[in-house]
Amino acid sequence: MLIYICHFCAFGGTKTLRSLSHQHFFNILRSGKTSLIYFRRTVNPTVRLFLEQLEQSSEPLDEYGITVAQVNCAIENIPKYCEDEGVQKKAYLFRGNIMLRSFATDTLFDVDATVANVLFILLFNEIRYVSSMADLQDIENNMKGKGDVIFTFVGAIGVPEHRAIMETAFVYGSKYQFVLTTEQALLEGLGFSARLWFCHCKMVAEKSQACRRSYYEQPLTTVNIHRYLKVLDAPLVMEVAVEPEKVSTIHVQLKMPVVFLFTQKETYEHDKTTAEYIAWQTLGIAGVVLAIYRDRKRELNLELLHELTDQSFNATLKGAANVLVVFYTAWDAVSQTFLRSYVEAARRLELFLALVNCGDWPDVCSKQNVIQFPTIKMYSQGDNPLLYNGMLGTESLLKFIMLSREPHPIKLTSVDEVEAYLRGELHSDLRSYWELSVLGLFSPNMKEALVFARHWTSSTECIHIEKPTTEEIVYAVKNATLEKFPEVTVENLAVYLQTQKPLLILFIDNDDPKTTKAKEELAELIKIKSLQTYTTCWIDLRNTHVGGEILQVYLNHLPQLPVLVLVYIHSGGHVFAFPEEQLISRKDVLRWLNKVQAGQEDPSSK
């Protein structure tokens, strides 16, 4: 079989670059449309290369209503043009039958240069070129109270940044005054290295007042500039009276950060000024929302909760065996959301649940070392308060409440009590909240040990501790509560991050044999304790949809699953991907991990 590929065998037959007859050429001129025409007399390597670039430029220019075509002067003799000896070194831009400009072919050296140069000529009256700061200031003065100015610097005419500016100006030219320069000295005079500046002149009421300038530091691409202008077109500060999760702004749609400031009637004016200041500092980087607080407590049934004050706080703690207290502020959105879980817990329990509004009683909160909201503490007589660090949901809170009310530690005095405890038969009413029994064995005549009984697997494990300290015991217990090879979800991710180990994550989206085999191979490595230095887990994209976005960020693409990824989340953030072309086997995984540790693998991202 003989396969022959030729890019330039017959120019008249190319798919996108039209070849015009004499009649077609004059029809285009009479139509009044804009066209870029190249007249060729012969074919040589230089002409072929130019025609290739012209062909690739025809599609983007067609989006702006510009016809790109060629005329073969050897077949179609167009007077004036085909008769010119130097015609092959030029391309001609027409608007109707008026020739606007001829371009030397070496200035149209690629697609970016072709699109940029053509649009630059067509937008001649919309784009001002300046060579000094005085020129820019004159334009700003003329636009005060009328419109805003977009000033840009490009290194040269025809570069990709120039094309991006021209395409943006083609869309927004009627809305903004575009100003262009290639003078480096002018850029330096502005004091920053940013290449795009937005001059806010429309808002200026007095001629003596300067136009406020904000700058954009991201790469100048058409998409980036369009996103930036969409953000600038939005209100500087958005005011809402709904929960943050219900807010939809252009920043949210573009997946940009959003800063929420919560205000109330008494501080509204001051908070609005603060919000506007923050908005100017973060313009184009993050959105700012001023959330007007309304008393959400009225929407909740707080009859089951007890509001404590500086007068009743200490007396309440002394009068009850166990008191759970939530320290909150009325304007904190997280606090308000958590109160719903708190009310539900109070409804399901017969327990004294209390509240302290730190906005009303800051001294109480300060004495209780409250530094964030909400803070939840269990107070039991004679003991230091227990701080709750779990998820802010009803079930997690109920588990904490039920277990923290019991004496701790439980003292066992017989073998029967020990066996009953490990079987979960002691305090059986708490078994639904009690997943792990921890038994400490301490004796002068034997090594100290911890015994873990896992009720969900009916298994026990014993570990010896040479010199037990509080920190070592806490660390051992926390590790024991973790699954060896868990499915990580949004709800439990924070728990596994506390191990401070690198994350070895298997991303899956089905149960095909390849995925099942990968899970089995990793489980076997965990069983033989070959992965003790890692937190090995898996994420199922069917259950945790955000996993796909995480993987996209890690690898800059979404590969075919399963995929194994190593993330040094606590030490530099480097991400390493197991080779996609290899099957995930014990031998290959260990070899890959050893190469990563030896510095022989390059990270996929950071």
Image: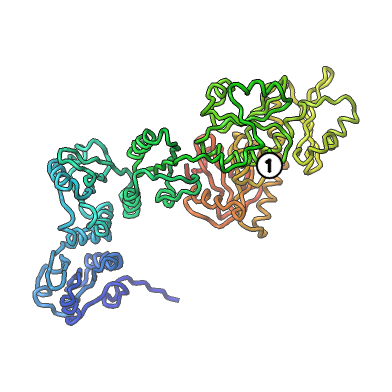
Drawn side of residue 190 relative to residue 306, left or right: left
Drawn side of residue 414 relative to residue 164, left or right: right
161, 342: nearer the viewer: 342
Image coordinates for residue 95, horizontal then vertical, percent: 16, 69
Q: Quadrant of residue 320?
A: top right
332, 441: nearer the viewer: 332
Q: Quadrant of residue 32?
A: bottom left
Q: Which residue is at a point 56% across and 32% down the rendered structure image?
A: 328
Image coordinates for residue 341, horizontal then vertical, percent: 63, 41
Q: Quadrant of the N terminus?
A: bottom left
Number of marks drawn: 1
Question: Is residue 534 among the parts visible in the rendering?
Answer: no
Question: Is residue 158 among the parts visible in the rendering?
Answer: yes
576, 335: nearer the viewer: 335
114, 499: nearer the viewer: 499
Image coordinates for residue 563, horizontal then vertical, percent: 58, 52
Q: Which residue is at a point 71% across and 46% down the rendered structure image?
A: 524
Provide the residue designation for mark 1.
395
Image coordinates for residue 314, horizontal then vertical, percent: 64, 20
Residue at the limit of the structure toward the bottom, as seen here = 23
Q: Amino acid at mark 1?
A: Glu
Drawn side of residue 520 relative to residue 155, left or right: right
**Colour convention of the picture:** rainbow
Q: Which residue is at a point 56% across and 30% down the rendered structure image?
A: 357
For disc 1, the neighbor class at 10 Å (few under 14, some 14 to 19, many from 20) is some
| Secondary-structure class at tag 1 | helix
